[in-house]
Amino acid sequence: MTTDRRTLRNTFELAAEKYHAARPSYPSALYDELVLTSGLRPGDSLLEIGGGTGKATVELARRGFTITSVELGHELAAIARENVAPFPNAEVVCADFEHWEPAPGVTYDLVCAAASWHWIDPATRYFKAASLIRTGGHVALWSAQHVFPEGGDPIFREIQPVYEEIGEGLPDTATWARSGELADHRAEIEESGLFDSVVVRHFDWVVSYDVDGYLDLLRSHRHGEMATGTGVQRDSSSSCRAARTPHPAALRCSPAHCPPP
């Protein structure tokens, strides 16, 4: 794993409380499709990689699955434990997934990662995940990304100069994807040679934020207040520009793709 990847994935600790409050939850339809495609039944054993504050952990535990969530950050893990406290079928382990091992002989019906797979070492992540799955089990990966439907709120385009000021601007080759146009992990999964089939699904949903909520969302990302020396400058600039927009809320329309091989 590169030093940059390892360093950046640790920065979420600095905004753990904002992360849970500001990050959008995933739609029920995603979990419905996950259960349908993988054939999961209540009581089945799940391993979650990089569970953060428990956004997905809680939903999976609520559906009756036995789930172990492995989270690198101590603050994130602490919040996750509070969130899953009502569910005796859920546990949160604070550990680095690349070096964590379950008890001898333990495997899982499903290994999943919600918006965290890109932080796991690409040289080993598929091999390790596959080694922890029972025969006939599945891996499920999903994430949330911006899309830009016709008529959607233009604020994300309008504040791009702010991102550019702090070195987080989009490259010249960037595209403004619409629903159904996002890239997925299909080719990468198939190239690993470790899975029999790959299924990809896209889900669209809308989350609206007021100015303060949107700034908290920005702070929960690696380029938010976690980026030392840039948070105050970017936040104040974003506040001014967001306040000037004629729209009362910042709109975030996010598809997620869930490939359970």
Image (tube, rainbow, N blue to C red):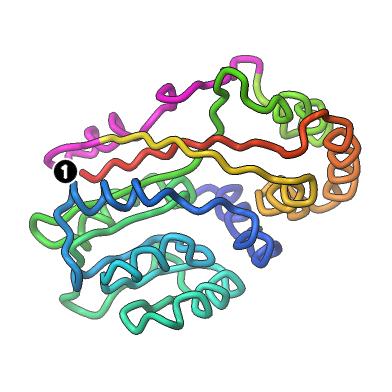
As rendered, which of 109 and 125 lies closer to the eye? Answer: 109
At which x and y percent is residue 91? 38, 78
Region rendered in magenta: 172-199
Q: Quadrant of the C terminus?
A: top left
- Residue shown at 26% from the left, 50% from the top: 34
Residue situated in front as seen by the camera: 217 or 100: 217
Dot 1, crowdedness within 10 Å: few (<14), some or many (≥20)? some
Which residue ends up furthest to the left in the rendered image?
135
Residue bearing mark 1: 195
The answer to whether 241 is drawn above or below residue 179 in the figure is below
x and y percent of residue 57 in the render? 41, 66
Viewer-proximal residue among 12 and 81: 81
- Give the residue displayed 60% in from the left and 62% down from the top: 20
Relative to 191, 252 lies left or right? right
Judge whether residue 154 is colored magenta.
no
Query: Is 186 a magenta residue?
Result: yes
> What residue lies at 8% left-to-right and 58% top-to-bottom?
135
* Residue 45 position (above or below residue 209): below
Helix, strand or loop status at disc 1: loop
